[in-house]
Amino acid sequence: MPVRTVAGPVPAPEELLAAKGATRVSVVVPARDEESTVGEVVTGVRRAWVEEVPLVDELVVIDSDSTDRTAAVARAAGATVHAAAEVLPGLGSARGKGEALWKALHVTTGDVLVFLDADLIEWGTHFVSGLVAPLLADPGVALVKAVYDRPLLDAAGHEAETGGRVTELVARPLLALHRPDLAGLVQPLAGEWAVRRSAFERFSVPVGYGVEIAALVDTADLLGAEAIAQVDLGRRTHRHHRHDTLGPMAVQVLAAVEARLGRGAPSRAEGAVLTQYVRAAEGFVPRPRPVDLTERPPAVSVEGYAQRTEVRR
Ligand SMILES: O=c1ccn([C@@H]2O[C@H](COP(=O)(O)OP(=O)(O)O[C@H]3O[C@H](CO)[C@@H](O)[C@H](O)[C@H]3O)[C@@H](O)[C@H]2O)c(=O)[nH]1
Ligand SMILES: O=C(O)[C@H](O)COP(=O)(O)O
């Protein structure tokens, strides 16, 4: 069965709360150097879904090695803030978005985790309710992805063209070649998604930007593509990377899928080097960038996870 597309409006608050019952919902915002936008994301979610309607039980920012005031801004806006590097320090720390999401599993209590990027510019608080609703309504759904228009903005903030460069040039072609069961996903790399803890805690998690595509493939492998739903949330804009900084992201997305094609085979080296070139007086100069391809083991396999989770719930 294919990925499901959820149609129709987001249910009304009272309907959502009735469906929620005792289900705990955690919103998790991974953030690296996002002091200019993280405050509005946290404030919007807190007002709409903690204060006005008690849909969200905890609102957590995972500070991913920021060197700016991200943590202070997020705390002032009402989030509980954890530094990724300080969660289970005995396990060491890696840099990356996947690391932040994996660490979130160890410091949150939700049965359902909702992930929102911290660099959102145009978005709405309906992102949270829209992502949670299919999970509350149907026990057969394990993961919900956001779908939206995502214009590529130029430096002046004007719409240049449709965004999602890694999506169009890497993720979608990869799915077409290797996972046609997931080709129905409109935004496979969307950073806004929700997942049941009972699924995510069983997945191996790439520490970098491979986390989204890995979670999709792992959910489909564990439960079938029909356990994945997507919901149309309208429009979203965010801060764009330069082309050259998207290169390492592309490597991580490719490597995450590659690792899952060869399940059971020995995993590839833990890292790769992406060499890019800049022109200088002496000609083209190589700029090698190390790319971390390591994966965290399933959270359930980490000593103490079950007890910690039990105590928390
Ligand atoms: O080391 C990092 C890097 C990023 N982030 C945060 O993760 C979110 C997304 O990062 P960003 O660099 O803005 O990614 P995008 O260019 O937006 O990449 C898209 O595609 C990626 C690959 O699938 C997804 O991880 C992203 O969520 C998705 O928005 C933001 O809140 C970042 O602050 C971290 O927490 N730690
Ligand atoms: O999802 C993607 O493809 C990357 O985040 C890049 O997005 P952008 O091209 O809209 O900046």
Image (tube, rainbow, N blue to C red):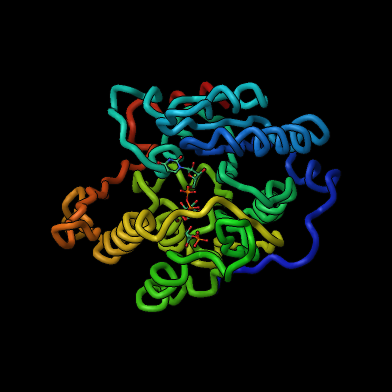
Compared with 86, 38 (above or below) is below
Q: Residue at 69% across / 65% down in the picture?
A: 6
Instruction: Indicate the position of residue 67 as horizontal and vertical percent values.
Output: 43, 28
Instruction: Reply above or below: 233 against 95.
Output: below
- Of the 4 image quadrants, the one containing the C terminus is top right
Quick one: 142 or 256, which is closer to the camera?
256
Residue drawn at (50%, 38%), measured in percent from left and top?
30
Residue sitting nearer the eye, 251 or 59: 251
Quadrant into which the N terminus falls: bottom right
In percent of width and height, residue 91 lies at 29, 28
Give left or right: position of 287 versus 56.
left
Q: Would residue 294 be found to the left or right of residue 71 on screen?
A: left
Whether residue 306 can be seen here? no
Total residue callouts: 0
Q: Which residue is drawn at 39% across and 37% down?
A: 300
**In which image quadrant can residue 103 be found?**
top left
Q: Where is residue 56 in the image (x, y as percent from the top left)?
A: 69, 35
Q: Residue drawn at (66%, 62%), measured in percent from left and top?
A: 231
Most foreground residue, 189 or 278: 278
Relative to residue 33, is residue 216 depicted above or below?
below
Query: In the drawing, does residue 177 fall left or right of residue 11?
Result: left
For the question of whether residue 237 can be seen, the reply is yes
Q: Position of residue 273 (x, y in %)?
A: 19, 53
Q: Residue furthest front?
A: 281
